[in-house]
Image (cartoon, helix red, strand yellow):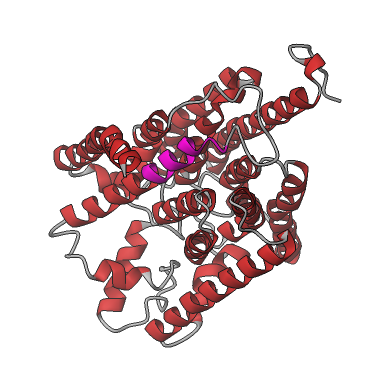
Amino acid sequence: MNHGKMHFQGTAGLYAAAALLRLLLFAFFPGLPDLLTARVEISTPVTSFKRLQEGLFLYNHNVSPYDGGVYHQAPLLLPLFSLLPDPSTYPIFIYLLYTIIDLLSANALYKIAESGEASVSRLFTSARKERRWSGYIVAALFLFNPFTIATCMARPTNVFTTCAILHAIAKAIAGNPFTAMLALSFATYLSMYPILLLPPLILLAYDRQYISKRASSLIQFAGINVTAVTFCLSALFLGSYLLTGSWEFIASTYGIQLTLTDLTPNVGLWWYFFVEMFDSFRAFFLAVFWLHLSCYVGGLSIRIRSQPLAVLTILVGIFAIFKPYPSIADTTLFLAMVPLFRHVFPLMRYTFLSASTILYSTFLGPAFYYLWIYAGSGNANFFYAITLVWSLGQSLLVSDLTFAMLRDEWEVERPEMVGKEIRQI
């Protein structure tokens, strides 16, 4: 009880300041949400708030939201948003909802950071475990990150996915595997790709259960949790079927991500590649791209078995680069988890380069898009080139963080090598 009271007292001011900042931006810049909603860097065909509104209009008029080929999001979002007043008339309720989601995500991050799992797990203890940031700092970095604020104001639906993923990790660390699997199931239902986080999340939940002496064998534990996820997803799909009266939502929500039928520009690598692709090669390269996205899961889960939270962080970063419809909201989730590993920051080698690259593409991306779409003085290559730079910056950060984690682990195994230079071959 005292710990919970101290937690509330320590974070209440932070959460209030973050909420106030968002509400002030909504109030003093009323045109900014619609401006950001239209930005391809933030909104994608599968997360756009505008498309959600179109689907909601059809739903409220007893028409299938998937008839127009515009709405590609989960059906159960529709009854949730239909409970709220019309956002064009009373936008404050939508603003409050997205602000609350951000605060819930920050609270989950706070709990993850306070657990110390990033530096001390069941199978690994970092020699730098004392060099970590408190949950307060980690939550503050997330709440006041300009990417997080821009995402909140643009109101894409993947903020719900971010919140669910962070709560799944927090519940796994807290020793509540079923709640963790329920949260991951909800994230998977909304965005599909979080199902790839299941193996490291099971390992994380198992390690935390093992510490409390409640876990059985890993295989049995994994089987139970896979069954739980299957049951939860089945219940969500059944609820969606009862809501819409058909199974067409599967093709519209998940099929579009598997087949990339909507080639709206975004900050990812897929859209331009498949714009230029001959139809005869399309199926092959779709399989290659999805295989590439999913092949990291097994290798990282095995190689960094001793640090499942590190695996989850790296995978989130990889998905932010290589998923079919990425946005800065996905990058926000990765950047939110990076400060958990403050203890390995001294081992990172390209921090300045990766940060500079990300900032460079952040400022030039909108300019290049303007030259292409509005000024007419550029073409698609302009925008795609800067998205490649954006992906390069994230790739540098992911690879550098992975190197630092492995170097930290190596120095624990071989203390005589601490501080010595090594050469990657």
Q: Quadrant of residue 401?
A: top right
Report the front residue among 310 and 280. 310
On the image, the x and y values in percent for residue 333 come to 48, 43
User: In the displayed structure, does residue 10 sit left or right of residue 259?
Assistant: left
Seen at 65% across and 50% down, the residue is 273
Whether residue 95 is visible, yes or no, is: yes
Q: Residue 45: horizontal and vertical position, in percent?
A: 45, 59
Q: Dividing the image into 4 quarters, which one contains the N terminus?
A: top left
In the image, which residues are magenta? 106-117
Q: Nearer the viewer, residue 230 or 77?
A: 230
Instruction: Give above or below for 105 relative to 375.
Output: below
Numbered disc total:
0
Residue 194 lies in what quarter of the image? bottom right
Q: Is residue 35 above or below residue 161?
A: above
* Magenta-colored stretch includes residue 177: no
Q: Main secondary structure of the magenta part?
A: helix
